Image (spheres, helix red, strand yellow):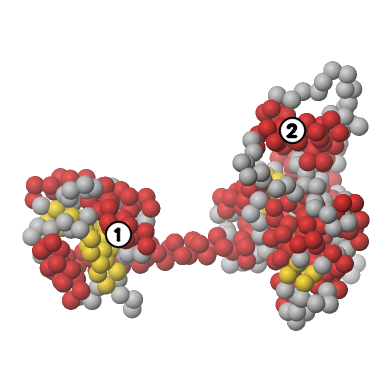
Amino acid sequence: MRQASVLLVEDNERERQITVETLREEGFLVEEAAAAKRALEMIALSRFDVVVTDLMMPGMSGEQLLLELRQKHPATQVVLVTAYGSIDNAVKAMKNGAFYYLTKPIDRETLVMAVTKAAELAGLQQEIMLLRTSLEGKLELEGIIGQDPAFLEVVKIVRKVAPSNTTVLIEGESGTGKELIARAIHRLSPRAQRPFVAINCSAIPGSLIENELFGHERGAFTGATERKIGLFEAADRSTLFLDEIADLDIGLQGKILRVLQEKEIRRVGGHESLPLDVRLLAATNRDLAQEVAEGRFRQDLYYRVNVFKINLPPLRERRSDIALLANHFLRRFSHISGGHVKEINREAMEALIDYSWPGNIRQLESAIERAVLLCDGEVVGVADLTPEVLERRRPEQSAGKQRADRYELPPLGINFERFERDLIIQAMERSNWVIAKAAKLLGMSYRTLQYRLEKFGLKKPEGANASDTE
């Protein structure tokens, strides 16, 4: 079993030496500090399971040290040592998170007992922190990779909603990773031990999808020679993911609404209602609110599935993630093909980052798989990229010149807000003040540009008869 590490903080040298010797004789790994500030310096460099500290010391007190530790090192347990006259302060410190307090002169057995119990608790706290980190890391293990602020916000939302039973609607363009997000929600939920059940509503003809979802009884129709369990039933006490839910027939939408309301199903051809405990996750590449407005999706079902919405940004709005994702796919496909391809050169990576990726992450994945197969050496170059990527490169890039959107920072720096404002004005003038066109030039979303226009107080000049419908 690992030896517990202890830091003793005591300004009285003789008392410090006696306590250190006592703890070392009991098998603890002990370091010592004569002041609280020195203790903080040592803790910043090494992790300690337990800190045993005198309460009253010159400079920073033991209580102040406790507050610092609770904030910065919550797994470390604190045992306070106090004189009789400061017991009230010790009790106050206990309320602030101290594990135990001892009175001087210190009783050996009580000291050893307190430090032993504190070390056990510290070990448990550390295991909990490691487990929490491991659970959070499942997102990345499931292929969810990104560091763009907009995407990190999505990950944060996923972690919050996953432990609940809330129905979640995931909206985003094709290829943005909607199913990966759904699987992450399932894996981080209490239902994770049961199978994740998924169906693509656009991949199955309308005449067959009801049978897939609800199952049927024997003899329900010609060819139904035996009972079939549907996906709703298969997902009992688990998660059912309806991908591309907007493609469902209106009539079938009504039957799904009934399942969500009544929490029961009836197989095709059956008369018995079966109770269900299913968490529903749904996804679509369309604007479901617009589908409702145009009569293609039931409003009552929309309210049922849109309890909690997650919007996935397209890859063109996550340009800082393109290199990260490209390298991830490179490692995967290189490993499959024998590991001969090691990296993507700078020119090829710049071309990848510059491309708009209408097919999003799925298209990038296919492009890297192709590049690995075509690459003759260890480095993927421009010649290995897909024609679509190369065709969208600007002329100055194809000629090997510096990218037009790559800038060198002047030695004296810049006024970033002024720089950003000037770029926005240039883009708006070039697009005749059509926000959608300017946003495309700047590589940002319509809403982001609209926000920045308001931020800088930029308005369309008189005489510029432009419309966002152009």
Residue 373: quarter of image: bottom right
Q: Is residue 188 visible?
A: yes
Crowding near the residue tagged with mark 1, few <14, some 14–19, many ≥20 C-alpha atoms within 10 Å: many
**What x and y, as percent, mark residue 34?**
20, 58
Where is residue 79 shown, x and y percent of the image? 23, 58
Element under label 1?
strand
Q: What amino acid is at disc 1?
A: Gln
Image x and y of residue 133, in percent: 50, 62
Query: Which image quadrant: the C terminus?
Result: top right
Most extreme residue toward the bottom is 338
At x 62%, y 63%, the residue is 140
- Residue in the image at 24% along x and 47% along y: 60
Residue at x-position 14% and y-position 67%: 17
What amino acid type is highlighted by mark number 2?
Asp
Q: Earlier in the sequence, mark 1 or mark 2?
A: 1
465 displayed left or right of 7: right
Q: Which residue is mark 1?
A: 77
Q: Quadrant of residue 361?
A: bottom right
Q: Quadrant of residue 323?
A: bottom right
Disc 2 element: helix
